[in-house]
Amino acid sequence: MTGMDEVEINVTVNGRPFKRRVEPRLLLTDFVRHEIGLTGTHVGCENGVCGACTVLLDGLATRACCTLAVQADGRRIETVESLGRVNNLSPLQRAFWEMHGLQCGYCTPGMLMLMTELLRENPHPDRDTIRARLNDNICRCTGYEDIVNSVERAVELMHAEQRR
Amino acid sequence: MAEAGKILSPPAGRQKERPDQRLNVIGTRMLRKEDPRFLVGRGHFIDDIELPNMAHAASLRSPHAHARIKSIDAGAARALPGVVCVITGAEAAQETAPLPCFANPSVEQRCLALGKVRHFGEPVALIVADSRYIAEDAAALIRVDYEPLPAVSDMMEAINSRGDAVLHPERGPDNVAEHRNYTFGPVEQEFAAAAHVVKRRLRWSRSGGQPLETAGAVASYDEGSGKFTIHVNGSMYNYIGFTIATALKVPSHQVNIVPADAGGSFGSKLFLHKVSVLAALGARASGRPVKYIEDRIDNITASDNHGSDRTYDVELALDASHRMTALRYRVVDDYGAYFQYGLGTHGNGFSQTVGPYRIRAVGAEIYAVFTNKCQQGACRGFGSEVTNFMIERIVDAAVDELKLDPIAFRHDNFIQPDEFPYQIPTGNLYDSGNYPGALDMAQQMLGYQDWRDKQQAARTKGRYFGIGVASCQEKGVFSATEFWMLNRSPGFALTSSPESASVKIDPTGKAVISLHAPCWGNSPETVAAMVLAEQLTMDPADISITYSDTDHGLPGTGPGGSRYTVMIAGAVTGAAAIIKEKLTRIAGHMLEAASHDLEFRQGKVGVKGAPGLEVSIAEIAMQAHFFRLSLPDDPTLTSGLDASYTYDHPLATLPKGEGDFGIFYPIMGHMCHMPVVEVDAETGQVSFLDYVAVHDCGTMINPMTVDGHVRGGTAQGIGTALLEEFRYDSNGQPLNTSFTDYLLPRVGNVPPQVRIGHLVTPSPYTEYGVKGAGEGGRMVAPPAVISAIEDALRPLGVRIDTVPVTPSRLRALIREAQTGQGR
Amino acid sequence: MKPPVFDYERPPTLRAALEALSRHGGKAKLLAGGQSLIPQLNLRLISPARLIDVSRLAELQYIIEEYGHVRVGALTTHNTILRSPIVAANCPIMTEAYAHVANHSIRNHGTIGGNLCHNDPAFEMPLVVMLTGGTMIARSARSTRTIAAERFFKAPYATDLAADEMLTEIRIPRLAPGHGYAFLEISQRYGDRSLIAAGCLLTLRYGTCRDVRVGIRNAVHNVFRLGSAEAKLEGKTLSAALIDAAAEAAAAELTPAGDLHADEAYRRDLAATLTRRVLRIACARAGQPLDG
């Protein structure tokens, strides 16, 4: 019963190519978390409502819990691990830290990836634009306001960085 | 019986660190120590744990609300390739004892249902397999022969259930888990003398913490030593963790419980007995490490942590001058299928059952009933958020019926700032407060009169603006007496609820603090580092924090009941005092100065009035660790630089008997919320125009994180008021088992800005005067929001007695009012 | 939860996909954006033996304006359509309705074809296609046929497609310049499944309503256009009272529908309210705002 044919997939995750044989039913969340070992992508609702699992698939914000690993074959995935490191946080991460945009940290990677996509397509989003996009994902801790403030702060930090 | 009022001889405090001193770190907006790991996706959440050769477990959920298990055939499941083992309830009962229960008499709950299932989703069998996918495939192959029993879904019906509809027949002939009457003060006399009595029936529906991360455990069993290691995202392991060992029928030193970062809890991960025991059971049976993580359906239907589910019939007595004198209520509370904390959630309510008001007497009749639903556990507020709702709703009802001003009426009834410490009729003490100050601040921040003017203008255009007011208490720092004081007989009448901290300074002067309870999304690391940095004048960057497992743990009760920050501050202060004493002693030797001439300054110990005459903590630490022979030959001066301190409850007394519970929840925070909403009367939709939240949690260690709690708690309270409800049909079948239908607030459901005001009324009993702040938002937002909606619809005469008030429900109330139907 | 076992294939062309569908028929499911299908798999509500992944068939991803129609390839994603100037210019009600379709991340992958084939009674696009008089092109290995919207949406979660057929294109007749349109929806959280949604199209000629189309999605039944409301308006001179009458007719005509989130009376009330509101907006957009 588990002997269904595995499928070979080639996926680029955070710039690194991976070749794996996977069951067709393997979810992209499990692939990223447990096959590749990047556990920053989290699972919340398991049916596409909360966005904790948001990654970028060919640059597009994607519910990894509603995506099969086979669907990522030949594509590029970006996860939270592609952003800055602890001693070199990206402007967006830095802004979340400065503006208290997280509490338990569970929704945070999904929020960061959702907003990474937004800031790439629109480097100057206003507050309403940020809130409209933030509607995608659920945060149970913050009440959202500090996340909106964080994204606004990220815009400032990004521009400061560009000016340097 | 306790007599309400100011206490003339207040209890002696043991506050060492005064709130009025000059502070350098405490009170600053320090960025959180917890954050960097979360920001880069390197938190240590339970599902992030991978152990070699680990297997994965899933449970077979009961599809019935109530049924006898006649037989289970797991043959096909066991034969499925990739399945390691399948454990049924009967098999589990051979190896486990019932799960921990604090009610007395206790109610038997098994990790896997034994003989009967009592709610949808209750685990019936555990499947351990090479992957979670296979475990779920196998679950689908298990054949269970159920004999359905009558299901009880309605709390009122539960009171009169008989026969097969009784969930726990060994406990009595009906589904009443407890029926108690409490009288605090002269209730009958006050009602007899009342000039006005206001009555309401109120309904608070069942909701829950529903953190984005479910509960889970990863367990391994070492056959050589016979020892379990259980990683779990729950709390209280260093408090009552030994009861997990009891459930596994092994000595407690054979179980080591290791905490994980929790992806939110809001109470729901208070004590995770079931997932811990199931993972451990699977590990012992399979000989492999086992990961058991609830999926969302498990978490919604079987987490053991649904919130309160109450119907109140409440009466408020007032005298001729509109002073509230007494409160009397009958409450039916649907506890679901089990009763793990007994009536604890009502004990919580009794800690602040008169709210911020000078109500002299309280009568409470409580029916706790069993129904075929997931059992109650903890949910931000632990029942006292419902008490707040009840009080503020009946206060609003009085304002409405007697045509009073909501602000003036509250002012006239508040306990005044000079009346503290103030004892309420239940015996609990309010340590300090300034309720008129909070109300004034909120009114001013909101521009209350401006909004009243805008409201008038809007009404002339057919628009409905409403201004809500709620003044509520946030009880902080529970005493263990509340675990049993409502039991008919106490059972295990514990009185300790300590918190510990261990501080170690290494030879280079860097510090590690070990906490003995977990990180729940609050900021224990930031708090601990800030307090130690304050004490030792260190740079907080030189301090890191770890979490002790039970093998290395000291007494730690953990987050819950708005206690963790207060207790960590106490524990770290205590440990720091020991370290400071040793640092001073060694520094005195190094500087050839008397201890009393020394002071701490910028990470150094120096001679007062002699700049430059000083040694750094790093230099002292090096001496302490490696240069024993340079120090005085005193056997009390041992090598190293470390200390542990266990901080007990700062102010608690024993119950004095029925009618006086003693002091059990005295560190009293306070909130005043004023939301402004617009109601679309045609669609029943509510939107926020403004929101002011004034919070008083005494001295703030970190105002940034306090603000975060206020905003987050407020959002949850808005969810409770408008969106969230676990729905069951009349057969006990759950109607919303995913986040598609159990509605957590999204960004569009909360105010764009919650304007926060801080009033600081320090506690005279805690270190630095800190009070709790974790639950307040959710404990006040529901009555505040409902008050605003009712105010908006006052021209129509709409009365709201039920939460959540969804668009459909609100529209129904408006329709009734408009067509003159209903009341 | 995790999906059950299934086989998977990703045919390289439409022809190959149709052949695969013909081979596996009712046992296979087409995987387009997966935004409705995979949640169902995750909850093990369905267990197809095979998924035929058509999401990358570029030949079905297009938006073309042609011969008075907008032709949309079935595998065009929601966000592509939402951002399409062709759609905004020729069928603005679709653009407006798209603001209510799930959320951005889901719209990144969800396709119009998948949405229409799922035919969730709360979904917006089936109503838009009905109102605009759209047609569906369905292909199989054996044939191609054109299905009018009225016949396509057979029942909640069911369409007229045979087991071997695939929806390949949606054709929306270009709407007349200057027409009035509006789409409104009520949900408890923005982007959620609607409690109720309403749309309308109309044209005003010298103050007289022509070609009025009013429709509702009630999230429970397979309801669309409300003939009695349309009849109240068609050929009449516009007035606030007329709109009220149409709104009452809409409420009266709507099949009562209650569920977890909204009761029957709510949907009846809201049918009237939303009908009134969409008509007012549409009239204003058609050049005749009504006072009050």
Image (tube, coloured by chain):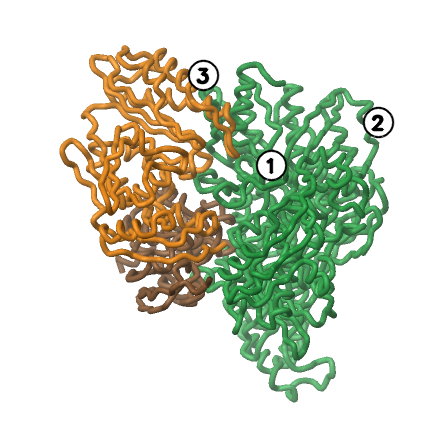
Chain colours: A brown, B green, C orange
Q: Which residue is mark 1?
A: B729
Q: How many numbered dots are placed on residues in this image?
A: 3
Work out whether A63 lies above or below B462: below
Q: Secondary structure at mark 1?
A: loop
Give A144 or A10, whichever is nearer the viewer: A10
Q: Secondary structure at mark 3?
A: helix
Compute the Cα span from label 3 to label 2: 46 Å
Left or right, B88 with respect to A120, comes to right
* Residue A90 in the image, given as x and y percentages of width and height: 36, 60
Q: Which residue is mark 2?
A: B189
Reading the chain from its start, which is encountered first: label 2 or label 1?
Answer: 2
Q: Which residue is mark 3?
A: B460
C-beta proximity under 8 Å, tags 3 and 1: no
Q: Residue furthest bottom?
A: B629
Q: Are marks 3 and 1 on the same chain?
A: yes
Label 2, residues with CA under 10 Å away: few <14, some 14-19, many ≥20 = few
Left or right, B442 with respect to B576, comes to left
Q: Secondary structure at mark 2?
A: helix
Amino acid at dot 2: Gln
Q: Residue furthest left?
A: C67
Q: Are marks 3 and 2 on the same chain?
A: yes
- Residue drawn at 29 percent across, 51 percent down: C55
Front label number (2 vs 1): 1
- Residue drawn at 32 percent across, 41 percent down: C162
